[in-house]
Every structure is written in structure tokens, then in C-alpha cells.
Image: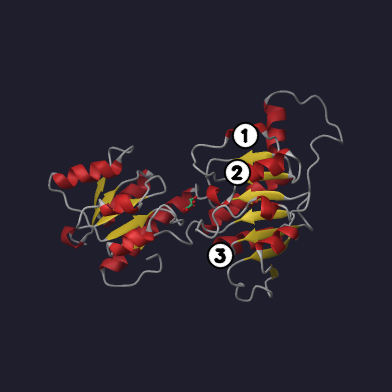
């Protein structure tokens, strides 16, 4: 591909060397050096004469209405290295006629594996177990020590049955779990795959031993895992969140965990991350990891590849499947 045919891309987030090499190869790429304020750097570059067609970034760069309005006028597309797009104001992007690309599918297996890891950690009291052994407090084996729950035969309730939710479901079935789910629409052929649709989130929670939050963060889902929903929970419920922190009302989940109203929680994502509500740290029945759902080499390379392929196809006049808007 000649240099003229390449998109001029400002890469606002820094990535693994292999991913950056792929961007460098496919695009006329400029990589941010000011990682704390890449959009300010973009504005400085443009005021010194640089021109860009695409801004490529990830979850660490918020593309709200203000940021989008301030983008250089040549920019025609936003490309986010994430499947989630809640950090992008789509109305503002549409007002500027910007195309938006993201990274569906390529990270779904990694996120599904993270979901299973968290669910097992919640069931087997991983925080307490790790603390006991690492703090050298383990005195003896006893049959009463750290008794968790077996997942086989229990029901996994999945809130949000998209691609990731379905991949979690098939893995959980291999553990011997029953699958219930709530989604805007029932999944095609879901019954035949052993996925039991529930009309409401309340009905789902009432039937679940594990509640897996796997829906996108939208105005409808934000704050939806709250006291009113948890009031329907079984006493043994474990809440797992691999989606977005703001879907959970922290005050309400923490109250349910502190009071023993539910068994536990396993969290990959947090409202306001990387800040984490301090109260979670005091709860032994909470297992936490720092948003590592797609942090595998396979997903990271795939995310780079799908952005290269999508932008290249779009430049050639095609309609790639990873165009989100
Ligand atoms: C995404 O891509 O939106 C995920 O949250 C990354 O783990």
C-alpha cells in the first residue's frame, strides 16, 4: 500500500509493541508521547501543521461531546481498541459525521474465560484462601476450613446475552451449570441450546445462584444492579461483574455483602476505575481483579488486527462488521 493510500492515524493510547508495529505498517501512524493528555498533544500537532483522518484510542481516553467537538476538522473516524463504547458520545460523533469502529468478537473468548475464573473464585472463596496462605496464617487442614460451593448443578443467570454472554454460557454448561438469562430479546435458538429466557432481571435474579453481569453500560443498565434488584436474590447469590462498574450501585451491593444478604461478589470492573470503592477491600467475600477481561495476548493482537482490517476495508469503500456507527 502506498503512503498516500494510508489513513493518517493519531494513536492516542499506547499498545503492545506487536500491535503498534501493525498500526505502523497499515497506517501513516503517529503515536502519542504524552500519554497523560494525548488529545492536547493531538491539538498541538495539528496547530503545527499535522493532519489526521483517524483517532485511535482505548478506554483510557474519553471521547465525550467536548473532546469530539475539539477534534481536528480532517478527522473522519474514531477507532476504539475495546468492545465497549460507553466512553464515546455517539450523538456527538454523529453530529460530526464521524464513523466509529470497535473490536467485537476478537476478545470474547478471553472475557468469557475471565468470567469463569471470577465465578470460580467467588464460589471457592479465593480472597480468603489466598490471604490465609500468603499471610502464613494457615495452621492446619480441617474439614471446616474455607468451605465454598460447587457450581455443578447450580444456575448461572446471565444479564446480557450477547456474544460474550453466550460464550460464558457454553463454558458454564461444561461445568454442569444450568443457564438462565435476561436480554432485550430472547436469543435465537436459545431454548435448544439450554438457555432459559427470563422476561425480567428480577425473575433472573430470583432463579440464579450466580448473577453474571455481561450487558453493555447504557442509560437503561446503569445502576440497574441495585437494592431493588438484589431484594430478589437467593441468600447464596454470587454477583460477578465483567461488564462495566457503573451497572452496579456500589452502596447497595456493599450493603448486601456486608449484611450477608448474599454470598459474595467477584469483580473485574469498577465504577470510577482505577479508583475502587474502599469498602470492597474490607470484605473477604469479594474477589477483585483490575479490569483484565481482555488482557490476553490472543485478544490484544486480535483487537489490533480487527481495527487494521476494519479501517483498511472502510478506506476501500467496504462496510466492515466492526463499524459501530
Ligand atoms: C472492552 O474492550 O470494552 C473491555 O472492557 C476490555 O476488557
Nearer-N-terminus badge (3/2): 3
Q: Residues within 10 Å of mark 1 (few under 14, many from 20)?
A: few
Marks 2 and 1 sit apart, C-alpha to C-alpha, by: 9 Å
Residue 299, given in percent of the width and then of the height, sits at 47, 53
| Viewer can see residue 309 | no
Q: Is mark 3 within 8 Å of ligand 1?
A: no
Nearer-N-terminus badge (2/1): 2
Q: Are marks 1 and 3 in contact (CB under 8 Å)?
A: no
Q: Nearer the viewer, residue 178 or 109?
A: 178
Nearer-N-terminus badge (1/3): 3
What residue did someone put label 1 on?
A: 279
Q: Residues within 10 Å of mark 2 (few under 14, many from 20)?
A: many
Residue 270, given in percent of the width and then of the height, sits at 54, 44
Residue 249, given in percent of the width and then of the height, sits at 59, 47
**260 left or right, relative to 247:** right
What residue did someone put label 2 on?
A: 250
| Viewer can see residue 253 | yes
In the rendered structure, find residue 162 and report the number of the disc placed on it: 3
Marks 1 and 3 sit apart, C-alpha to C-alpha, by: 31 Å
Marks 3 and 2 sit apart, C-alpha to C-alpha, by: 24 Å
Quarter residue 53 falls in: bottom left
Q: Are marks 2 and 1 in contact (CB under 8 Å)?
A: yes
- Quadrant containing the N terminus is bottom left
Q: Residues within 10 Å of mark 3 (few under 14, many from 20)?
A: some
Amino acid at each position: 500500500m502506498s503512503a498516500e493510500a494510508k489513513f493518517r492515524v493519531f494513536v492516542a493510547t499506547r499498545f503492545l509493541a506487536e500491535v503498534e508495529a501493525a498500526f505502523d505498517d497499515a497506517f501513516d501512524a503517529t503515536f502519542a508521547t504524552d500519554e497523560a493528555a494525548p488529545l492536547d498533544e493531538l491539538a498541538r500537532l495539528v496547530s503545527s501543521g499535522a493532519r489526521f483522518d483517524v483517532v485511535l484510542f482505548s478506554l483510557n481516553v474519553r471521547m465525550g461531546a467536548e473532546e469530539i467537538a475539539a477534534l481536528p476538522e480532517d478527522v473522519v473516524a474514531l477507532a476504539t481498541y475495546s468492545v465497549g463504547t460507553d466512553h464515546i458520545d455517539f450523538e456527538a460523533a454523529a453530529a460530526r459525521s464521524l464513523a466509529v469502529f470497535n473490536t467485537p468478537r476478537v476478545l470474547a473468548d478471553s472475557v468469557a474465560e475471565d468470567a469463569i475464573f471470577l465465578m470460580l473464585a467467588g464460589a471457592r472463596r479465593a480472597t480468603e484462601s489466598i490471604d490465609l496462605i500468603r499471610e502464613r496464617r494457615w495452621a492446619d487442614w480441617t474439614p471446616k476450613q474455607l468451605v465454598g460451593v460447587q457450581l455443578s448443578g447450580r444456575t448461572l443467570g446471565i444479564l446480557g446475552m450477547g456474544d460474550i454472554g453466550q460464550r460464558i454460557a457454553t463454558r458454564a454448561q461444561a461445568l454442569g451449570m444450568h443457564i438462565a438469562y435476561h436480554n432485550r430479546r430472547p436469543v435465537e435458538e436459545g431454548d435448544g441450546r439450554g438457555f432459559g429466557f427470563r422476561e425480567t432481571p428480577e425473575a433472573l435474579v430470583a432463579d440464579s445462584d450466580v448473577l453474571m453481569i455481561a450487558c453493555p453500560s447504557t442509560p437503561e443498565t446503569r445502576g440497574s444492579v441495585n437494592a431493588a434488584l438484589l431484594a430478589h436474590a437467593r441468600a447464596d447469590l454470587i454477583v460477578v461483574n465483567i461488564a462495566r462498574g457503573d451497572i452496579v450501585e456500589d452502596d447497595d451491593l456493599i450493603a448486601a455483602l456486608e449484611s450477608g444478604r448474599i454470598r459474595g461478589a467477584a469483580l473485574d470492573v469498577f465504577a470510577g476505575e482505577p479508583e475502587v470503592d474502599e469498602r470492597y477491600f474490607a470484605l473477604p467475600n469479594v474477589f477483585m481483579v483490575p479490569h483484565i477481561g481482555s488482557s490476553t495476548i490472543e485478544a490484544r493482537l486480535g483487537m489490533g488486527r480487527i481495527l487494521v482490517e476494519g479501517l483498511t476495508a472502510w478506506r476501500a469503500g467496504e462496510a466492515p462488521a466492526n463499524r459501530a456507527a
